[in-house]
Image (tube, rainbow, N blue to C red):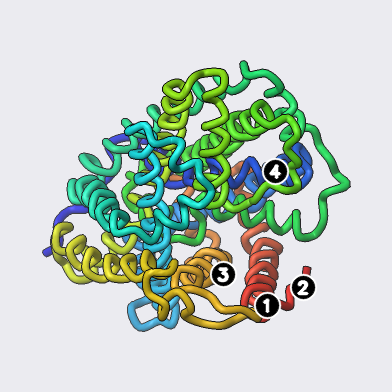
């Protein structure tokens, strides 16, 4: 017999863990720059609308399904539809997706750890060299950092839900928030900082195009960990008396506030140090910003704070991003871990050992696909160009499959699990939900326009990435 399923010790523990999952690398850098380049306050407004009217219904669908079945994504789909149902393939896809996303996320987290240690040891000037990143990612030391990151993730996950995931979230999330607020206060006191605030917050609706609207929805969808099976898995660790609806709202608010606040750190810092910055020239890539642009910005601080002061600020920043990466990585890898534990009735130690062998091998290959091994660097051709093994994982499982998973969960909840069962689950722990406007809206949106929007995004992404023929 399988062991009794663990649960979060409290609603707060769940909210911190789910928010930790949602708050990732993209929130810290990618989101603020994307907002600045695409209309500032106009982008933020569109993003907030998508979070409220599209993302929260999908969050409720995932979390409700998880709590009802008390299972991982595969177990949730088969628990409702049956083990022989074609829907079991949707369950497997929702498990394979975080498994593969964990591969590229691990690679980036390894890089962050390397840069963090460089700032701690006084090598800020080294990482600020534009040529350093290319040298670093192809150096043997990245494999040592990979072992260190894997050890941290294993230490958290092997202890389970309460003693591992929840305890880590209770420490890392408050620490992340404190460091973020410290950085915001520091940056806003720099000369010319409010020029960055102006670019970030003042709406410019002339920059809002179809692609910007699509990008805002994608950012909201990805930011909240939708389509990764994480919220299904975390929802399965909730007790029936917990207010699932209120928890979903708080997770969405927490994630959005962190992303918004990060913008008050990144953009003012850039403009304070380089008043002539052209927002249109900033890269929306979190990788490019974190590993090439921002180290140069921090080094410029040495002109006013001295080299030690600049190194301390850089250390705080990379610690902040590292914590965000770890909380996300823990939640990502928990999905396949929970699946292996349930389906094969093995211990967490054995499940994690299996993942170390499989995911670890793929991570090694992805790490070596930036020039170390030419076969994996020039791995495949699509969309009119050649791509590495790392690129393939990112394009398929992060950019393409997530909206497909979101579409499948909407269809499954409304048409297979059935609306009345879904509503009954959400009403447990929140008696007022059954009579609320939110209930009517969630039921209507999941049945009508949300699946249509996700289908359009999925097909447009496929056409854009793999055929270079985007609809918009």
Question: Marks 4 and 1: in contact by CB < 8 Å?
Answer: no
Residue 351 is at least partly visible in this image: yes
According to the picture, the residue beneath numbered tag 1 turns out to be: 463
Say which of 359 and 456 sits in front. Answer: 359
Secondary structure beneath disc 1?
helix
Mark 1 or mark 3: whose residue is earlier in sequence: 3
Residue 73 at x, y = what percent?
Answer: 38, 64
For the residues labelled 4 and 3, the Cα–Cα distance comes to 22 Å
Mark 1 or mark 2: whose residue is earlier in sequence: 1
Question: Quick check: 470 left or right of 376?
Answer: right
Residue name at image x 49 percent, y 40 percent: 251
Residue name at image x 61 percent, y 45 percent: 31
According to the picture, the residue beneath numbered tag 3 turns out to be: 400
For the residues labelled 1 and 2, the Cα–Cα distance comes to 8 Å
Residue 95 is at least partly visible in this image: no
Give the label on residue 310, or none. none
According to the picture, the residue beneath numbered tag 4 turns out to be: 35
Say which of 73 and 395 sits in front. Answer: 395
Crowding near pointer 4: few (<14 within 10 Å), some, many (20+)?
A: many
Residue 449 at x, y = what percent?
Answer: 71, 63
């Amino acid at each position: 017999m399988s062991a009794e399923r663990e649960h979060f010790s409290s609603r707060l523990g769940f909210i911190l863990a789910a928010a930790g999952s949602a708050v990732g690398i993209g929130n810290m850098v990618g989101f603020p720059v994307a907002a600045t380049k695409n209309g500032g306050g106009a982008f933020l407004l569109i993003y907030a609308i998508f979070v409220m009217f599209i993302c929260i219904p999908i969050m409720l669908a995932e979390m409700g399904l998880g709590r009802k079945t008390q299972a991982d994504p595969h177990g949730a789909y088969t628990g409702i539809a049956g083990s022989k149902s074609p829907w079991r393939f949707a369950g497997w896809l929702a498990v394979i997706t975080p498994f593969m996303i964990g591969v590229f996320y691990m690679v980036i987290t390894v890089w962050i750890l390397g840069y963090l240690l460089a700032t701690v040891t006084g090598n800020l000037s080294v990482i600020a060299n534009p040529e350093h990143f290319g040298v670093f990612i192809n150096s043997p030391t990245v494999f040592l950092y990979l072992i260190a990151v894997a050890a941290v993730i294993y230490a958290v996950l092997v202890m389970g839900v309460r003693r591992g995931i929840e305890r880590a979230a209770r420490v890392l999330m408050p620490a992340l928030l404190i460091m973020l607020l410290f950085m915001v206060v520091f940056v806003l006191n720099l000369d010319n900082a409010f020029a960055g605030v102006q670019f970030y917050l003042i709406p410019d609706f002339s920059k809002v195009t179809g692609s910007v609207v699509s990008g805002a929805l994608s950012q909201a969808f990805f930011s909240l960990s939708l389509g990764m099976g994480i919220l299904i898995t975390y929802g399965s660790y909730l007790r029936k008396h917990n207010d699932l609806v209120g928890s979903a709202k708080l997770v969405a608010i927490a994630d959005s506030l962190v992303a918004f606040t990060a913008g008050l750190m990144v953009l003012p810092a850039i403009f304070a140090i380089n008043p002539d910055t052209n927002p249109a020239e900033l890269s929306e890539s979190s990788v490019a910003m974190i590993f090439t642009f921002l180290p140069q910005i921090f080094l410029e601080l040495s002109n006013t704070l001295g080299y030690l002061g600049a190194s301390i600020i850089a250390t705080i920043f990379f610690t902040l991003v590292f914590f965000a990466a770890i909380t996300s990585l823990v939640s990502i890898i928990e999905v396949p871990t929970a699946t292996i534990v349930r389906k094969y009735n093995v211990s967490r130690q054995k499940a994690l050992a299996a993942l170390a062998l499989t995911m670890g091998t793929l991570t090694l290959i992805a790490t070596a696909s930036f020039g170390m091994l030419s076969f994996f660097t020039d791995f495949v051709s699509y969309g009119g160009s050649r791509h590495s093994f790392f690129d393939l994982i990112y394009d398929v499982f992060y950019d393409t499959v997530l909206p497909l998973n979101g579409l499948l969960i909407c269809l499954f909840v409304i048409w297979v699990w059935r609306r009345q069962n879904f509503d009954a689950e959400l009403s447990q722990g929140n008696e007022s939900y059954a009579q609320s406007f939110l209930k009517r809206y969630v039921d209507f949106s999941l049945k009508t326009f949300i699946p249509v929007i996700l289908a359009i995004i999925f097909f447009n992404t496929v056409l854009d990435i793999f055929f270079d023929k985007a609809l918009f």
